[in-house]
Structures are given as C-alpha cells and as structure tokens.
Amino acid sequence: MQPIKAHQHHYLPDESATNALGGALARALAPGLVIYLHGDLGAGKTALTRALLRALGHTGTVKSPTYTLSEPYNVMLDDNPLSVIHYDLYRMASPEEFLDAGFREDFDGHNVCIVEWPEKGEPVLPPPDIRLLLSVSGNGRAVELQALSELGLLCLDRLAFLPPPQ
C-alpha cells in the first residue's frame, strides 16, 4: 500500500454538500488521475462521481456501471478534451475479468479513472493517486481524501472545498 502524502477530512451534511465536493474535485482534476472510491452500498460514491461529471459539463445520465463495469464520459477540462472513465467493480467475479476486458489500458496517464469497489480489482488494478473514503455519518456523509502520489497531492493542494459549518 502506498504511503499517504496528505489527507483531508470533511463532513457532507446533505446532497448539496456532496455536489459541492464533486464540483471542487472536478476543478482540481489533472489528466491521468486515478481515484479509488471506498464505501458501503449507499455511501454516496456514485452521487459524488455524478456531481464531478456534471461540474465538467456532462448533461446526460450518470449511473453506476454495475453491469457494464465501466462507462466512459468525454468532457472538457480547462478547454481541453478529457476522458473520465467510471468503473464499478462490485459485480466483477475476479481480477482477471479486469484484465480480460482490457481496462488496464485505460489507465494510460491521460484518462481520469474513477473506481468504485477497487478492492475487487486487486492486485491487477493500477494504484490510485487519491483514495476517497465515504461513510454514512448521522444524516450525512463523512469523507476522507488521501493523496497517495505526487499527482494526488497536486490535486488535493488545488482542492478548494469549504464544507458547510457543522
């Protein structure tokens, strides 16, 4: 496991706070970033990904790719085209499925790859730049963002997110 270079803790009391964090993450992205999303069912992983994609200008549906395992989105980041690929590995039977599908090629240093249930892809899944842990806390969500690489650290340094007061 990679050492944590920096981390942030936030509390998201409601959907608008989740949307705000998704928007802040979208503005802090860099091409090639790999983000792992950890959390139980219903913790808000897909909601956060949806908020991030909407902030990047995607207007269509964003649902968790539970059966297809991956869903690519073509968006713009700082006036440059960017592919964001959303993975949900929950139903993956084995890590070999990840390799057989050719998903490893998507982690090419250009695409932003967001992975729900990354533990299902270990040990063949490329390592993350950011690990994001979501958990239900009261009526809202607790979130911890961990930078695990220089690129992840750059993203967290640029993250301008002010959570609502608790």
Image: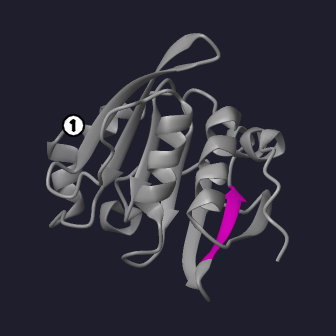
Could one spot residue 127 in this view of the protein? no
The amino acid type of the residue labelled 1 equals Gly
Q: Residue furthest top?
A: 79
Residue 40, given in percent of the width and then of the height, sits at 42, 79
Against 95, residue 9 (above or below) is: below
Identity of the residue drawn at 79% across and 57% down: 5
In-image side of 56 versus 28 (left or right): left
Q: Which one is nearer the viewer's eye here, 22 or 165? A: 165
The stretch of residues the image draws in magenta is 141-147
Residue 136, given in percent of the width and then of the height, sits at 54, 82
State the residue position of label 1: 102
In-image side of 67 versus 147 (left or right): left
Identity of the residue drawn at 39% across and 31% down: 59
- Crowding at dot 1, Cα within 10 Å, few <14 / some 14-19 / many 20+, comes out as few
Looking at the rendered structure, the secondary structure element under dot 1 is loop
Against 149, residue 37 (above or below) is: below
Quarter holding the C terminus is bottom right
Against 81, residue 55 (above or below) is: below
Identity of the residue drawn at 69% across and 61% down: 146
Residue 50, given in percent of the width and then of the height, sits at 44, 47
Task: Give residue 7's quadrant in the image.
Answer: bottom right
**Magenta stretch contains residue 114:** no
The kind of secondary structure the magenta stretch mainly shows is strand
Quarter holding the N terminus is bottom right
Identity of the residue drawn at 26% across and 44% down: 70
**Magenta stretch contains residue 143:** yes
Q: Which one is nearer the viewer's eye here, 71 or 153? A: 71
In-image side of 14 versus 98 (left or right): right
Against 58, residue 89 (above or below) is: below
